């Protein structure tokens, strides 16, 4: 309906928009968030005080994302050492890990580094949100900055913009990471996308095109031939992680997706494999911990020490800015799902 909508409603909040609020109970107390509804079925929550990451997400009131037993946790409860990250990790649709390190806890270059970095537990600054009414429709925008800094260390800033349009089931994430310091710094970033029930079920299918698949551990190797298969929740399931090199189109763009035949719809991720060449599948189908991570990164999450030793550690120069862009969208119905399958099958 585009702009014709205005003759049918009094205020846009009747059908879509952004709602800003504060969580007031438990370990989430004091955490600010934004609920976004596109008016076409897609809804999601951006958590201001957790790096503008995305917690809850749904389509037609059916959940997309996985939420850990922690629930939403305020950044004050973050534990940086060892695996302390797991005590405040809520997963959600997106947790962004980094910026100066990701992955396994380690000792690197004289620093003791915990799991997955500090970014995801850092509140955003200079946050704004707006609804833009243009000749060709309505756009919802949330933007802000997340800084990772240390005296005698890194001075990195992530600028994030999240966009979606009224009447569409697509959201776009535009990130810019800048080194505001005067020394070269490690830059590791991992986009930890996490899908849960009821989208994730034995009726769901992972769509991707890969050149290679490498299991992270001997246990993962045992499930290599069935790494894309999805079972019911299993008590005591031991996570399995796989590193994939994906095929792409002629521009280096690739899509992966999770679609559910029973629901008749699914979600895709679209990204630039030249910006983010590492794809990680996190398969964790445990009872009460039933989640599939389809993650994208500029690095392997085996610890910064190992990446440095292998000569693979990415860096960002003083004054340099690196950009990372994503599109997440819903495919609904046989025709859209079939078209997506054909597109992914065409990648080389």
Image (tube, rainbow, N blue to C red):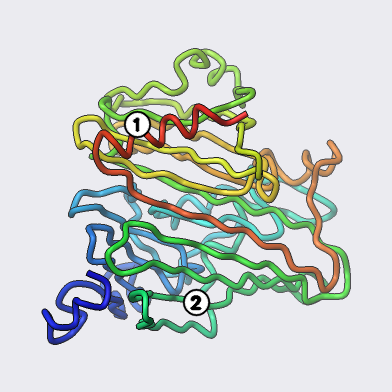
Residue 145 in which image quadrant: bottom right
Which sits in the foreground, 125 or 61?
61
Which sits in the foreground, 108 or 343?
343
Residue 61 visible (yes or no): yes
Residue 99 in which image quadrant: bottom right
> Mark 1: few, some, or many residues within 10 Å (few <14, many ≥20)?
few
**Quadrant location of the C terminus?**
top right
Q: Which mark is residue 338?
A: 1
The image shows residue 229 at horizontal and vertical percentages of: 39, 21
**Quadrant location of the N terminus?**
bottom left
The residue lying at 39 percent from left, 64 percent from top is 73
The residue lying at 83 percent from left, 44 percent from top is 308
SS class, disc 1: helix
Q: Which mark is residue 206?
A: none
The residue lying at 70 percent from left, 53 percent from top is 188
Which residue does the numbered mark 2 point to in the structure image?
143
């Amino acid at each position: 309906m585009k702009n014709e909508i205005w003759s049918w409603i009094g205020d846009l909040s009747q059908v879509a928009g952004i709602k800003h609020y504060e969580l007031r109970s438990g370990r989430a107390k004091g955490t600010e968030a934004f609920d976004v509804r596109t008016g076409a079925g897609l809804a999601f929550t951006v958590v201001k005080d957790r790096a503008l990451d995305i917690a809850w997400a749904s389509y037609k009131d059916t959940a997309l994302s996985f939420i850990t037993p922690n629930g939403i946790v305020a950044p004050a409860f973050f534990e940086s050492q060892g695996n302390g990250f797991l005590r405040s990790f809520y997963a959600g649709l997106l947790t962004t890990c980094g910026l100066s390190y990701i992955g396994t806890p380690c000792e690197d270059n004289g620093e003791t580094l915990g799991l997955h970095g500090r970014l995801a537990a850092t509140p955003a600054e200079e946050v704004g949100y707006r609804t833009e009414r243009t000749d060709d429709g309505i756009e919802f925008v949330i933007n802000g900055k997340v800084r990772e800094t240390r005296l005698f260390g890194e001075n990195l800033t992530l600028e994030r913009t999240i966009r979606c349009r009224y009447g569409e089931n697509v959201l776009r994430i535009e990130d810019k990471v800048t080194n505001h310091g005067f020394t070269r710094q490690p830059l590791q970033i991992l986009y930890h996308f996490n899908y849960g029930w009821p989208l994730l079920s034995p009726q769901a299918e992972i769509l991707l095109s890969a050149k290679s698949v490498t299991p992270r551990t001997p246990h993962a190797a045992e499930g290599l031939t069935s790494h894309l298969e999805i079972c019911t929740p299993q008590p005591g399931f031991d996570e399995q992680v796989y590193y994939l090199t994906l095929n792409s189109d002629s521009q280096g763009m690739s899509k992966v997706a999770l679609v559910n035949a029973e629901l008749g719809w699914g979600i895709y991720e679209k990204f630039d494999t030249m910006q983010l060449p590492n794809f990680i599948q996190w398969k964790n189908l445990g009872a009460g911990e039933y989640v599939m991570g389809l993650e994208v990164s500029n690095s392997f999450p085996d610890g910064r020490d190992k990446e440095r030793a292998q000569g693979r550690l990415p860096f960002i120069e003083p004054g340099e800015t690196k950009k990372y862009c994503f599109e997440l969208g819903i495919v609904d119905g046989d025709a859209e799902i079939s078209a997506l399958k054909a597109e992914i099958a065409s990648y080389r």
